[in-house]
Amino acid sequence: MERPAEPPALDLALDAAALTARLVDIPSVSGSEKPLADAVAAALATLPWLRVDRHGNNVVARTESGLAQRVVLAGHLDTVPIADNVPSRLDADGVLWGCGTSDMKAGVAVQLRIAATVPRPNRDLTFVFYDNEEVEAERNGLGHLARDHPDWLAGDFAVLLEPSSGQVEGGCQGTLRMVLRLPGQRAHSARSWMGDNAIHAAAPVLERLAAYVPRHPVVEGLEYREGLNAVRIEGGVAGNVIPDACLVTVNYRYAPDRSRDEAVAHVREVFEGCGVAEFTVTDHSPGASPGLSHPAARAFIEAVGGEPRPKYGWTDVSRFSALGVPAVNYGPGDPNLAHKRDERVAIDAIARCEERLRAWLSAGVSAAA
Amino acid sequence: MERPAEPPALDLALDAAALTARLVDIPSVSGSEKPLADAVAAALATLPWLRVDRHGNNVVARTESGLAQRVVLAGHLDTVPIADNVPSRLDADGVLWGCGTSDMKAGVAVQLRIAATVPRPNRDLTFVFYDNEEVEAERNGLGHLARDHPDWLAGDFAVLLEPSSGQVEGGCQGTLRMVLRLPGQRAHSARSWMGDNAIHAAAPVLERLAAYVPRHPVVEGLEYREGLNAVRIEGGVAGNVIPDACLVTVNYRYAPDRSRDEAVAHVREVFEGCGVAEFTVTDHSPGASPGLSHPAARAFIEAVGGEPRPKYGWTDVSRFSALGVPAVNYGPGDPNLAHKRDERVAIDAIARCEERLRAWLSAGVSAAA
């Protein structure tokens, strides 16, 4: 019998920067996370204070000390495709280069370091490592865990260690796509009065969009910025035909004080009286509250410092929110460097993130206890 | 040596309906007109009062009697693809069924009958039979003749025997297509305020189109009806991107009192101040005057009767107009039956057309002369 290959070993005694380099050197492009998931699970299994569960290439480790609160630290294992930027390289300025350095193996290294070095935290801890974050939503490992093992994700507060330049980014905005169909009637364009032009019928829709004044609602102290935009328009049958349909796809990005249903109702209301024959929702992911009023969140913000910022884009914090767990993004990487060939992370930012999380999760626990 | 195949023979002594049936039974889908062109040329060559010229599968026959005026009778030899409707079939109600019956072998039969039966016309006559009318403009045989032998098409007045239900259709409207580009600036749709939405920028263009009041100019007694319509709109990069371009294709159908340049200037003027970054003409065929004030045309209308109607669509009369020859459509077929599987023509309409043309072209010439 052939002996199965040993998973690459991860030494959790390395500092977070060295551990990040080690993680980058184990390629884990979306769909190919198994070697890295194996290595993470094997390393966590050596820590006796953790219970480790696995679902596909998703690994969840938990303390079970019966503490009053539970905090989830989550990160994805996968990266976008490698672009000649693996293995990693540390330069003389303390910058680590390579695929996934920023998004988000530096964050995963911080998770692993906290798991290894905080055996008696002040709140029960759950560490979530998941696959397929960089690809279509239906493959997302956090989504699979939420569907199949929601109890593994339970908690009072969650931190996603996505790149946020060491700033707390609270909640996220929802995103709704709807297709608006304007009707018409075909005719030869040489006898246009016999028809009814569906492209012309889109005029009031575009006027409403051009005149739209988006809300800037403040939710738990964070000012969000909404937007309602056409992202596609299509109409036309042939160069000599009055078109009988025009489709306008709008994307509504909305603050987390608005529910799914309210968002849909708002879009329908905006275009009331514009002659839209049909509204079709093609894509909808609701927003997530920042959850900053929760005591665990307040302690977190105090510990890590800085001014929380709203997250305008949609992120996986929404999946925690849907499970009733307020969540924020907080990680060492720079989001502007994610997915780039020259992706990199400053190693002192990784260490700072690790220290601050450790301080938050250790505060009040006697070192001698 | 192999003996070349004889061209199918056409007996010009047949009546126009029987001749139409014979023409339908010689298939001549665009690009395959040679057997029919050969047959037409051979039949015309038996008529000593005609000079016959040929250019590819285009056949031109002329009387050269030095008369004061010259009239051109023109028709295309080709048909759209056969749809199980060849050979022709004459039903008990006097209706001839088959591909090309209406568009326009009935008209071609009338041309041939006039050629064969009016040896001493009151005006010099030119008979034009051309190929590839049903396909792209650059293959059009009348266009090739206009380019290579414009003298063969010279005349004071031309009649195209296209199906017009036995009514005179005067001139034709021009058709101009222009693409209007609206500019913008890309941004992520979660941060739409960083960009500039090109689809929203199309709102004033569509408003102008929706509010546009077309002219109904009267040209030589015929009331034309213009139209300005969007026939295509396209914009959008991705579902999460503010688009940086939106293209609107407009089709302006304009009456023959407006020149090429005036038409382009009009479209640019309509959209003045709408933020259009670029206008591109993609297709332009000018209109044609009905030419009804010419003495030959007046005599023609008197002879054939009825009230002349304007032609809203673009037709080959425009090619004659470009050569300085006023032209009308006048043929026995019903244009609504053209290109259909159940294409057909009433044989009494063919006979009526032939009689009226003969009356017009024979008037004043003594039968005994």
Image (tube, coloured by chain):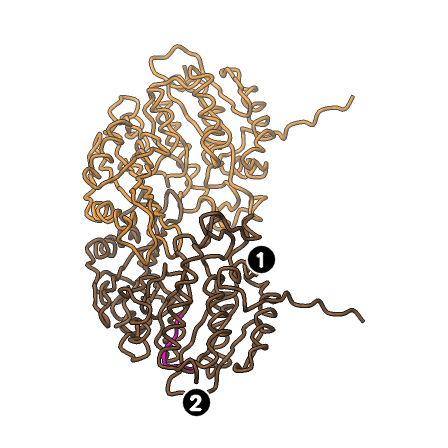
Chain colours: A brown, B orange
Is B113 or B132 nearer to us in this picture?
B132
In terms of image quadrants, where is residue A154? bottom left
Q: Amino acid at mark 2?
A: Gly
Q: Quadrant of the N terminus of chain B?
A: top right
Chain holding disc 2: A
Residue, x 52% and y 23% (percent of image)? B59
Q: Is residue A157 magenta?
A: yes
Residue B303 position within the rendered picture, expressed as x and y whole percent measured from the top left: 31, 30
What SS does tag 1 mark? loop
Percent from the top left, x then y, of residue B176? Answer: 32, 35
- Residue to which mark 2 is pinned: A66
Q: Which mark is residue B291?
A: none
Q: Which of B107/A117 is in front?
A: A117
Measured as percent of width and height from the top left, residue A288 is found at 33, 72
Q: Chain of mark 1?
A: A
Residue B260, horizontal then vertical, whole percent: 29, 27
Q: Residue at x 29, y 70 (%)?
A: A264
Q: How many residues crowd mark 1 within 10 Å: few (<14), some (14–19), many (20+)?
A: some
Give above or below for B185 relative to A316.
above
Residue type for callout 1: Asp
Q: CA distance from mark 2 to mark 1?
A: 37 Å
Q: Is residue B28 left or right of residue B321?
A: right
In the rendered image, residue B201 lying in the magenta stretch gets the answer no
Residue at horizontal 34%, vertical 65%?
Answer: A176
Q: Which residues are magenta?
A: A154-159
Q: Which mark is residue A25?
A: 1
The reply to whether discs 2 and 1 touch (Cβ–Cβ < 8 Å) is: no
**Which of the 4 image quadrants contains residue A311?**
bottom left
Which quadrant would the C terminus of chain B be assigned to in this image? top left
Mark before the other along the chain sequence, 2 or 1: 1
B251 relative to B163 in the view: left or right: left
